Image (cartoon, helix red, strand yellow):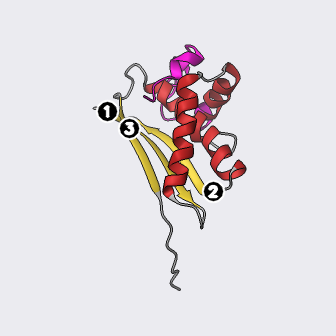
């Protein structure tokens, strides 16, 4: 069987700090705030509210010499990558202007701990304050 499907897929990526460097754990939590499940900011906005995306995810990939923060997205038919990128940039601007609230940060921390057995204690280091999540510049 051959599927003749032509879907666009977008990717925004930023270089980040090395693993276990200051900011690494906070970026893990930021990925959860933005794209860590159906209640995350970008999933809720793009998929559930505006119904312009088929899927989206945000992830922080930690590496020895430097990490990568990535947001990926697939628009629904009839919508383009530029439309999704506009909304993503709006959400990033909101994040820059107003830090993550404590309750949202706690939900992100719990999701991260549930998913991340590979780096025990890493998320706990990120328990500073919601204002520390201002790493997307």
* 21 with respect to 38 (left or right): left
The residue at the far left in this view is: 65
Neighbour tally class for label 1: few under 14, some 14-19, many 20 plus, Cα within 10 Å = some
Residue beneath label 3, please?
14
Residue 110 image point, x, y percent = 65, 29
**According to the image, label 2 marks what residue?**
52
Q: Judge depth for marks 3 and 2 and give the one in front.
A: 2
Tell me which residue sits at (53%, 31%) in the image. Answer: 93
Name the residue rendered at 49%, 50% in the picture: 72
- Marks 1/3: CA–CA distance: 10 Å
With respect to residue 50, does 89 lie above or below? above
Q: Residue at x 66, y 52 (%)?
A: 47
For marks 3 and 2 on the same chain, the one whose residue lies earlier in the sequence: 3
Q: Is residue 69 magenta?
A: no
Q: Are marks 3 and 2 in contact (CB under 8 Å)?
A: no
Q: CA distance from mark 3 to mark 2?
A: 24 Å
Q: Alpha-carbon distance for marks 1 and 2? A: 32 Å
Quick check: can you spot residue 95?
A: yes
Q: Position of residue 97 (x, y in %)?
A: 56, 23
Mark 1 or mark 3: whose residue is earlier in sequence:
3
Query: Label 2: few (<14), some or many (≥20) within 10 Å?
Result: many
The answer to which of marks 1 and 2 sits earlier in the sequence is 2
Please identify, in this view, whether the residue under mark 1 or under mark 3 is nearer the observer: 3
**What quarter of the picture does the C terminus occupy?**
top left
Write the start and end of the magenta stretch as one range.
112-137
| Residue pictured at 52% horizontal, 23% vertical | 133
- The image quarter containing residue 69 is top left
| Residue extending farthest bottom | 1
- How many residues crowd around disc 3 within 10 Å: few (fewer than 14), some, or many (20 or more)? few
Residue 66, numbered circle: 1
Residue 117 belongs to the span the image colors magenta: yes
Q: Nearer the viewer, residue 85 or 55?
A: 85
């Amino acid at each position: 069987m051959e599927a003749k499907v032509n879907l666009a897929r977008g990717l925004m990526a930023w270089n980040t700090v090395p693993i276990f460097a200051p900011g690494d754990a906070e970026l893990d939590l930021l990925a959860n705030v933005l794209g860590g499940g159906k209640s995350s900011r970008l999933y809720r906005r793009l998929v559930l509210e505006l119904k312009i995306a088929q899927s989206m995810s945000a992830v922080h990939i930690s590496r020895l010499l430097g990490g990568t923060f990535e947001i990926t997205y697939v628009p629904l038919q009839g919508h383009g990558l530029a439309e999704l990128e506009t909304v993503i940039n709006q959400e990033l601007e909101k994040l820059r202007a107003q830090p993550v609230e404590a309750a949202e940060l706690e939900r992100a921390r719990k999701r991260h701990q549930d998913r991340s057995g590979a780096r025990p204690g890493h998320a706990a280091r990120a328990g500073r304050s919601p204002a520390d999540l201002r790493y997307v510049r």
